[in-house]
Image: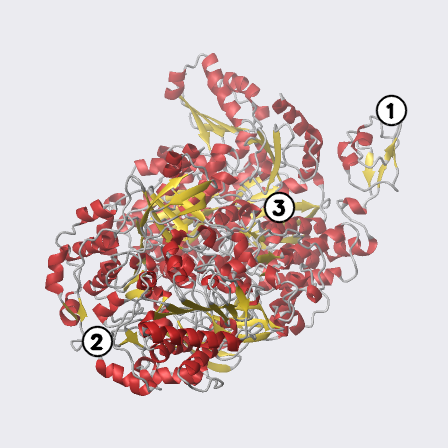
Amino acid sequence: MISLTIDEKKIEAPEGATVLEAARLAKIDIPTLCHDPRMKPHGACRLCIVDIAGLPRPVTSCTTPATDGMVVTTTNPRLERLRKTTVELLLSDHPNDCMVCIKAGDCTLQNLAYKYAIRESRFKGAVRQHNRVDNNPFIMREQDKCVLCGLCVRVCDEVQGVGAIGYANRGFESDICPPFKNELNCEFCGQCVSVCPTGALSAKMWAGQPRLEGMENTETTCTYCGCGCNITLHSHANKVVRVSSRSDNHNRGWLCVKGRFGYEFINSKDRLTTPLIRREKGGKLEPATWDEALDLVVAKMSAIKEQHGADAIGGLASARCTNEENYLFQKLMRVGIGTNNVDHCARY
Amino acid sequence: MNSEIIVNVCMGTGGIAAGAEMVMTAFKEEFEAAGVKNARIEERCRLHKVGCRGFCARDVLVDINVDGEVSTYQYIQPEMVKRLIQDHVIGKQPVTEWLVGDDYHVFHDNQTKIVLADLGKINPESIDDYLGVGGYTAAKKALTTMTPAEVIVTVKNSGLRGRGGGGFPTGLKWSLCAANEADQRYVICNADEGDPGAFMDRSVVEGNPHAVIEGMIVTAYAIGASIGYVYIRAEYPLAVDRLRIAIAAARERGYLGKKLFGGQFDFDVKIKLGAGAFVCGEETALIASIEGERGMPRAKPPFPANKGLWGKPTIINNVETLANIPPIINKGAEWFASIGSEKSKGTKVIALTGKIRNTGLIEIPMGMPLNDIIFKIGGGIEGDKLFKAVQTGGPSGGCIPQQYIDLPVDYEGLKSVGSMMGSGGMVVLDETDCMVNIAKFFLQFTQDESCGKCVPCRIGTKRLLEILTRITEGKGKKGDIELLQELAEDVRDSSLCGLGMSAPNPVLSTIKYFRHEYEAHINQKKCPAKVCNKLLTFFIRQDMCVGCGMCLKACSVNAITGEKKQPHHIDNTLCIQCGSCFDVCKFSAVIKD
Amino acid sequence: MAGLAAKFGSGAMSNSVEGISRNEALFVIGSNTTENHPIIGLRMKEAVARGAQLIVADPRKIPLVKFATLWLRHKPGTDSVLLNAMMHVILAEGLEDKTFIAERTEGFAEFVESLKEFTPDFGEKITGVPAEDIRKAARIYASAGNAGIYYAMGITQHVMGTNNVHAVGNLAMLTGNLGKDAAGVNPLRGQNNVQGACDMGCLPDVFPGYQKVAIPEIRQKFESAWCAALSDVPGLPASEMTEAMLAGRMKGMYIFGENPAVSDPNTNHAVKGFESLEFLVVQDIFLTETAELADVVLPSASFAEKNGTFTCSERRVQRVRPAIASPGAARDDLAIIHEIFQRLTGGDAAATVQPAEVFNEVASLWAGIAGMDYARLDRDSLQWPCPTKDHPGTPYLFEKTFPRNETGKALFTKVPYVLSDELPDAEYPYVLTTGRELFHYHTGTMTRRSTGLAAVAPEAFVEVNPADAKDLGVKDKEMLTVTSRRGTIRVKARVSDIVPPKVVFIPFHYKEAGANRLTSDALDPICKIMEAKVCAVRIER
Amino acid sequence: MEEALEGIYQKTVAHGDNIITVLQEIQNTFGYVQEESVHWFSARTNIPASKFYGVITFYSQFHLTPRGKNIITVCSGTVCHVKGASRIISRLRDDLKLPEGTATTKDMMFTLENVNCVGACSIAPVVLVNNKVYGKMNPEKISKTLKTYKE
């Protein structure tokens, strides 16, 4: 452990921590746009600048290692002026259409504008124009809202190992796009969407649905493969309208295309809503009441058990249903029917 | 003809542009025509290509050395060669009207040459020439008689500071690098000279590439690096060629490769060509570029000396710094420290250009007053115009006005007036230069070259440029100067790398010293230097116009009318002040005011 | 599963996903991790980025190959030979962990004897992997301080699947890569709660917590807990149920949340089985292909509508919580099963059941999760074993002992060379292998109803090597007929060097071109797993 | 084309050279960087095409479209700027009938580019034609020089 002083507070931090990490451990807030602890520091947004005693100019806390005895100031009029100018500059090249932006209320840039009470930027001038709409069904790119924090590029490269998008051009014309500005051709994991601090990246499926703050959130576990990712189901009016994942869980907030975007089946019109019964062999399946259906199940199962013995009945449990359901199912087979003919599809 | 004759033709980029290759060919042909056979040229009459001697404005420069008596000719063209041979080589009578004048000697005599000492004397493509002037003795001395630590101490004691811009003490940088535990270290020679108005490194590499290689060998030995890179602009094809030749020759002679000078030390050098990005002159961006990435700077710390190329300790020195190393090793730290000023030791190579009589490459002792550079070496302002300012340090520097003409030129001196040494470009401006336009020019440059990574530089330089542009177009508003100043300060203080940190310097220094010019643009909508077209009115002097019709054709908005052979007129309600008519008029009939 | 249990005493992933990034070497065999377990795949990529060496053994050039130090393209069905040959090299070069072998294993001497014939050259002959690569792989794996093995259905879905699993286990034992952090033998589970279904006793021979039905004391424990007499006869595994149906021994069937009419190998055969039943109940959220065969279909709740727990590959028990209400009259599976149970056993049909109660009942019967309850799980997930309320859960197994038997030692098992059941011949010259693709899950009932996923992966395809395509005169995207001894499908060609020559691959998500109509239902004799990964087919335009 | 690319691969990547060198070689061979060559190299090296594209668009040296037979480069360094480089550029645009925003003539004979500084400031303003340096230029001289390349 090393000890340092941040804003006149003595702080202990682990060896190798950055100034930003040390400050966050001590619950000292430093604004950032381009930082995510799950990725390598980038130092591009310049919002996390701090003064360090002995250094001639402010440095970014996300890239500067904390050292023993360091004296750090995270806020003073000069630093706040620089931060405010940076935000103003960003807003001067931004559509500022928060009213119709899906990210409103959940947008780091918007929060910063609020924090610094920037009604209007002092700087007006050229703005980047991006009118492109991609054909892919998942990811909506509104690059005129991009602040070039690079999180999407880094997550795609460092975490996903795909590199489907990258920086292009330089300077004011810098852009983030697939190679040769082609259509996005990737795994559509949506990791980029999950880390974007503004409305530059969102999901097409979210459009027209309530914004994040208008939804109910439920912490649960993904229903697909065996990775067991923790997810948050965002629902509205008894519909699941978005899936996300918190960065502090064991899958660190990362999801795959199925987990993140494969939720429409839940509210599919194909869902079964009533029990069905085939009233005669070769006949059709017809709607029935629960009582009718369950009576039939119990009567038929009992009859087969009566006639052919319990082992003439088998049960297949579900590798997709809960532990409790599976437990109760095998108990049903073993106690209610009296057979060990219970298995599940784990083998294929 | 028993005398020994040596003809040196200056073949730097400037010389070649002026026709040096044709002059060279002419010499060969004329020698033959004059009956001096090839064989005898080899024997008696050596024809040399040499590197730039600095005074490129007078190219093609040719030395004719007859038995040790050197005469230097200027502005030589192929058709003049015949007479040179007839009169001077054969007739032993120098062609006096073609000889350089006194100003040539004033130009050279006021300089102190360490780095440039052998430029213009040796053939840069001949390792033997370099060996002939004591080449590779410093490397031998360091590797065979000194420990790495002793080499570092010598460089520390010499007081040498980085010549690439920052002026960081070279010896200290080396010792920081050497202190790291590492299985591999690197030396990088930064030859990515991108500052507009600077050509020191190009000339040194073109004129004496082995000196740079030798400097790298000593550096590598001092810090324990076995691999070196020269990162050089692809826009310098001649320098690249000469460097390739030099590296191959050094390898062949065993100055590069395994077990140098019979010891245990291995070192080799690779060339990496820059691909056209000014920001790659910044060390961390240069490293990214060598790693094959976009040249986007990385935050410091960690510094390259600790974690550089591929994460290994790396020393990056520029061409001039490295070229200073062999003389320091050979002549000692005390010798070097005796030259220059208190905190800036040694000399500085400067590209002296702009509205000045003697443009070219010069080397001065640190601390020489600006006045001496401009008016002694430089010979004063071109065309007897008035001196207005000198721009130093390229896009990172500032403009120094008349009032500081006695300023000593060293790191501290330039910094004290809001400019900087940079890599050593010095552009002299006269009364016809508009300082707002100059600031705009540099902002256009830095804005184009901003890598786009950090916000203040990416958007801030764009906004600075936009404000400057509107001022030069007569759309400046009250408060624009203050807005420029505030934004410039914020960009300076919060940008990621040196490019953004120094990009506002041209704005801040011109506002500081030439605020009245800004005010004239904004308040009176006038450009005092008559440069900013949008603020000018164009008209045609009826007494000068011959009615050639050139302006009429050039005008894209049909604002000019007039019959053939009759004086023309400009309709100012239509004119968009593009300046085309002014440019095309051969009779100075178009006037702007 | 049974393979690992026999060797170690537990068949689950020995280690944790979190530890993957700390592996110095990773050996991935028979797992297309980045497509089938994408988030586990991320950890593998992270390990590589941190400098780990990755060995991928797969006949297909799966996406992970891009990150691999070494790729072993062995022939389908030759996994155990490849593994044996690697172990031959390890022993020959003295790279084995002698201390671990001496202190923590048994059966080593016989095992060494059995490896004799598996020289790298023999390995090359059988697997097609150059002997030098086998040596390299052995060295990389055995020299790493922490090496993990990761596998999935590519290892198990073979007639010699159990053998393969034994071979994998042997390799880890030989190098001491068990009982420590960031190592181990790690079967990756294909579905969200395969682990949980096994843990909960949905297996014919064990009660919850892998407690054998054949052992009287155990049976008595459950009889007293459940207040009922229990059968001591192990039941039929799913893969043998089809035969039992066709033979008339099985008359009634209750299936919930599965779609065997698409996922079963040799589905034509399986469907005939279901059709021959007297009574079939299917409980699902959609009218699946299996449900269409049913006599009664019960509408149930999706995961987004229910309360409970899932247990993922790394033995992590996690909460599932409802976000919305089920549509129409659909009810959650727990309530349905509970009501049937009550009706069958004469209990109160109107009584309700809480998932937490059920969980507590399991915890009282299986020490593995005895320390867990919903209150704890609501705070954070836990990895079993977690025997007491203050136990933090177990990130990796076998730290001190192997719970196989009293000796506490792991068992080396001889793994002979066994051929796949159905090899290509003149009539069926291609090997078909099956699997999943990134954009779909299992039989596609969920993913193919998600518009985006359906749009990017709309239809089935068969991967054909360019050389084979040339032989067959087939162009990319052309329709082909693929036929095995069991069935035939029409499917679009995807000409790609992802597959080696003479091997074709078809994903099994698409019912309209069901790959499992072709696959074989030959069984592994021990594990009763079907050989879905290798069968012989012929291809026509 | 594949053969040429494989040749470049052997010359560069096989010796540990980075993608900038690869792209420089591609451009030397084909005159510009075609998209297909990037995809080929991306597949061959497992380096995402996005990295190549990022590098290509970052460095001014790389071109994604074919360039003219003759490359005219006008230096726009400080000294050339104060000595009238912009007048040379507008003259060249006039002579070549190149509208603002285009760099290459329709007949693919000329491409007009500018460069930050070629470091030949003493002979400013400077124009390079196919890497041959022309110093102390003015609009008249450049028009004359251009003519020699038109033939």
Is disc 1 in contact with disc 3, using a CB cutoff of under 8 Å? no
**Residue A41 in the image: x percent, y percent?**
48, 64
Secondary structure of residue under mark 1: loop
Residue B527: image location, x then y, percent: 78, 49
Residues at discs 2 and 3 both on one chain:
no
Q: In which quarter of the image is residue C471?
A: top left
- Tags 1 and 3 both on a single chain: yes
From the image, state whether disc 1 or disc 2 is nearer to you.
2
Nearer to me, C250 or A228: C250
Q: Is mark 2 on a helix, strand or loop?
A: loop
Marker disc for residue C401: 2
The amino acid on which the numbered mark 2 sits, given as a three-letter code, is Thr
Mark 3 = which residue?
Answer: B427
State left or right for residue B567 relative to residue A313.
Answer: right
Answer yes or no: is residue B124 visible: no
**Marks 1/3: CA–CA distance:** 42 Å
**Other residues around mark 2 within 10 Å, as few (<14) / some (14–19) / many (≥20):** some
Location of mark 1 (residue): B564
Question: Dot 2 falls on which chain?
Answer: C
What is the x, y in percent for residue A215? 61, 73
Residue B181 at least partly seen: yes
Quarter that holds the C terminus of chain D: top right
Q: In this view, does B513 lie above or below A62?
A: above
Image quadrant where residue B170 sits: bottom left
Disc 1 marks a residue whose amino acid type is: Lys
Question: Residue at 43% across / 50% down in the picture?
Answer: B291
Q: Quick one: A189 or B155, which is closer to the camera? A: A189
The chain under label 1 reads B
Q: Residues within 10 Å of mark 1 (few under 14, many from 20)?
A: few
Q: Give the alpha-carbon distance from disc 2 to disc 3, as whole Å.
A: 80 Å
Q: Residue B546 carries which label?
A: none
